[in-house]
Amino acid sequence: NAGVTQTPKFQVLKTGQSMTLQCAQDMNHEYMSWYRQDPGMGLRLIHYSVGAGITDQGEVPNGYNVSRSTTEDFPLRLLSAAPSQTSVYFCASSLAGVQETQYFGPGTRLLVL
Amino acid sequence: AQTVTQSQPEMSVQEAETVTLSCTYDTSESDYYLFWYKQPPSRQMILVIRQEAYKQQNATENRFSVNFQKAAKSFSLKISDSQLGDAAMYFCAYQSGGSNYKLTFGKGTLLTVNP
């Protein structure tokens, strides 16, 4: 198993550009989520999904869109990037049930100029 | 809303010694989970240890153990026989035991291991 994979590893964007951060898992996990990590802070939840076709907002959803058309993939879209979205983004997944351990991807570092 | 506080921004330990990282949390729930994640320079988030609130016994994983004090809402991590590879940022995290999968993280403690 590859586990949780994220692409790209690093990306530079200009303000106003759009892009999609990719997240995929091959563990048949129902639950997937996106976090952002800013300097001096822990991770904060952006969006999450408990299964294909179901998504919901987390703590800091503004400026981000998600969809979940398959169990394996959970892309995060930035429609119009802003410097405040400069961060490291982590995708996580787990089996259904809050008692299950969440596994994190390697992260995507995003720089918005 | 739940909060997680790590009061030690940085800690250092000598190789082979023991170090304890502190974490306190605030919640009105009785059913929840607590975690310690390690983040080395590679940025990968690695689960170190987890504790179910309903379990009185403290969790242990090899050289890592926790001191879970439910009444005091304290969840410290003890690393025994510290190794150079233990150097990393350590995050304490809380998860509700209801239907909410959200992890609430502390700000982290940067651990340095001196040879």
Image (cartoon, coloured by chain):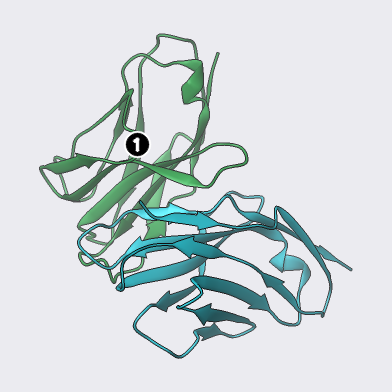
Q: Is residue A56 above or below residue B80?
A: above
Q: Chain of mark 1?
A: A
Chain B colour as displayed: cyan
Residue A1 appears in view: no
Q: Nearer the viewer, residue A66 or B53?
A: B53
Q: In the rendering, at what x and y percent does residue A81 appear? A: 41, 16
Residue located farthest toward the right when viewing the structure as drawn: B115
Q: Nearer the viewer, residue A10 or B99?
A: B99
Q: Residue at x 28, y 71 (%)?
A: A99
Decide if residue A49 is on the left or right side of residue B48: left
Q: Residue at x 47, y 68 (%)?
A: B35
Amino acid carrying mark 1 in the image: Gln
Residue A67 appears in view: yes
Q: Residue at x 84, y 74 (%)?
A: B15
Decide if residue B111 is on the left or right side of residue B95: right
Q: Which chain is green?
A: A
Q: In the rendering, at what x and y percent does residue A89 appear? A: 45, 38
Q: In the rendering, at what x and y percent does residue A92 appear? A: 36, 52
Task: Read off the residue under disc 1.
Answer: A22
Q: Nearer the viewer, residue B25 or B115?
A: B25
Decide if residue B79 is on the left or right side of residue B13: left
| Secondary structure beneath label 1 | strand
